[in-house]
Structures are given as C-alpha cells and as structure tokens.
Image (cartoon, rainbow, N blue to C red):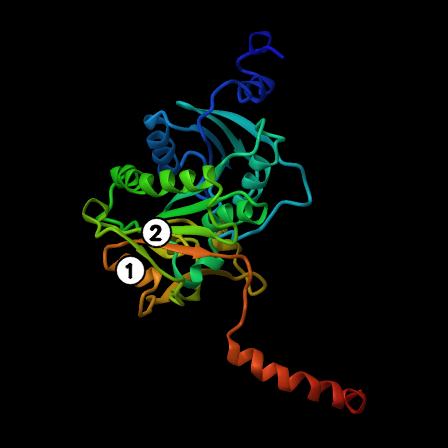
Amino acid sequence: MSNTSLDPLSFEYHQAKGGDDDDRPTIMVTNDDGIEAPGLQALVRVLVSTNRYRVWVSAPHSEKSAVSHSITWSHDLTAKRTQITGATAFSVSGTPADCTSLGISKALFPSEPDLVLSGINMGSNCGLHIVYSGTVAGAREAFLYGVPSISISYDWVGGTSSMNDFTLAAEACLPIISAVLVEIKNKTYPQKCFLNVDVPTNVLNHKGYKLTKQGSSMYKMGWKQVTSDTAGGHMLSTMTMEPIPITSSTDHQAVTQDQISFRRVVKGAPVDDGETDYVSVKEGYISVTPLGALSHADIDSHTFFKEWLPAVAERAPSAL
C-alpha cells in the first residue's frame, strides 16, 4: 500500500508510514502523568532532536499517577492522534499499562518497538513506591511481553525544580538509552529485567550513574477528614506530595452523618539506608535499578511457612 494513497490525517496513514525504509531503532514512549505532561514532552523532544530514533507515543489522555499496574477490562479504549513534533503520537483513554500494551501490540503501530520508555515522571519512584507507580508499570508491562523497557523519573522539588530540568534529565539519560539499544541490536541485552532510572533534583550537577537496588523507603500516609474549603495536596508522584489549595467535589452543605469526606495526608518522610535507589538519588546520583516482575518473600519467611503449612494440614480435620 502506498502512503500517497492515504489521507495524512488518517489512522491508516500512520500505520503504513511506519513500514517505510527508515532503519533507525524505534522507541515508544508512555507515562502516567498524561500525554501533555512536561516530562513526556521533554523526553520526546530530546529523542527527536538526535535524529537517531523513530519515536512513537502511546500515553494516557489524562493524569494517571499512582494507578499502579491496573488495566482496563470493562470497556473499550480509544486512541486519538495527537500532534507532537517529530513523533507519531496517540492519546489513549487508558492506564499506563493499557497504553504500553496497545502500543506494542501492532494494533496501533505497524510493528513492535525496539525499546519502551515510560516517563519522565514528575517525582521520583523509589523503594516501595514502585508498587504504586504507573510510570514503572508502563515499563513493566512491556517487560512482561518481552520488550526491553526503562522507566524514568525526576526527583521534582517544588520551589527548586524548573520545567527545564526535564530536558536536562532526558539529556542525562540519553547515554543509557543509546547503550541499551546497542545491546538490543547485538542481542546481548538481558531478558530477565527492566530498568528503573531516577534522576536527582540537581540534575545539572549530578554525580553520575549508580547501579542500585530497590530499597524499602516509602512515605507514611494517613487520612484526614475534610470539608469543601480544606486545603489539600497534589500528588506529583508516588513519592512526592505538594500542598496546593483545592476544593472538594463534595458540597460542604451536603456532608451529613452518612457522607464524610477524607483526604490522604503525609505522616512521615521516607527513611532508607545502604546502596538503595532512594539514598543514591538523594546523594545526587542517577540511580539505575534493574527490576523484575516476581515478588518473592525473604528466605526467612519461606523457611517459617515451610514448617508451618504441614502442621496446618495435620490439624485441618479437627479444625472443621
């Protein structure tokens, strides 16, 4: 099928266009902050500026922070073509995992990408917050289907960070992206992991790359009863809360004993130690953490249940 026979604004045109003689590696970008988020826009802009990659975008049409690895099952998804200079982009009515799944399926784009990038997230994704992260889930979904992937987050700090830091973060990650693509081309890239990259706040003066492990840091969260005029907090990521005045959708006059409004509040800052992702980012390094998909318990727990479960089975008849 010739590209000239198709409307340049049509969905079919962009499917056919991907089948040309362009032999550059293909990178698909997604995120959880939404397709218009500054982190994704900066990442795509930097990738396109190198002229070394074909860039596709399949990202949520709105913010989907902290949705973890949820997927859409009960209704159809829609993909709307969106203008991003130098890229073929679609905004999708789904979660980050949905966007990745659709983007690598060959239903939206004409082929499977060589690499999936998820980010750049506004706020770090370290430690146990990885469990909640839609950004990390966007990369994990690709990994589950055998497509190499990297999630990228920037440790945004209100009052210190600026939008230009997303561009600096993207540029700082280019050597990692390029090196991964070389390994993919040479068929030497490990198949049993994906990478989670966290960029420090002072990215201009970062201390270099540091191989880390996932730590156990997390914000301690609680709940506070609120009324419609209570100031709240905006979740920048699973690791960052920035206070801003917002209005509850619940009318103050409508709150009764049968209906009470609550809002999440931060009750304690993360604590971690050792060569972990969180500590390394706070020390000014770009943290590079290989992740997998399995959630193994520690060996002590396994040992305990190895002895415990047979005893449960022996007592089972008498317990009924």
Q: The residue tagged with tag 1: helix, strand or loop?
A: helix
The picture places residue 59, in percent across and down from the top left corner, at 49, 36
The picture places residue 279, in percent across and down from the top left corner, at 29, 63
131 to 53, vertically: above or below = below
The picture places residue 7, in percent across and down from the top left corner, at 57, 11
Disc number at residue 280?
1
Q: Is residue 196 left or right of residue 204?
A: right
Q: How many marks?
A: 2
Residue 25 appears in the figure: yes
Q: The residue tagged with tag 2: helix, strand or loop?
A: strand
> In terms of depth relative to the viewer, which is nearer, 175 or 280?
175
Q: Is residue 299 left or right of residue 179?
A: right
Contact between marks 1 and 2 (CB within 8 A): the answer is: yes
Q: Is residue 131 left or right of residue 198?
A: right
Would you identify the image quadrant in which residue 51 lies?
top left
Name the quarter where the C terminus is drawn: bottom right
The residue indicated by pointer 2 is: 198
Q: Residue at x 57, y 28 (%)?
A: 109
**Among all residues in the image, which is located at the extreme left?**
205
CA distance for labels 1 and 2: 9 Å
Q: What amino acid does circle 2 point to?
A: Asp
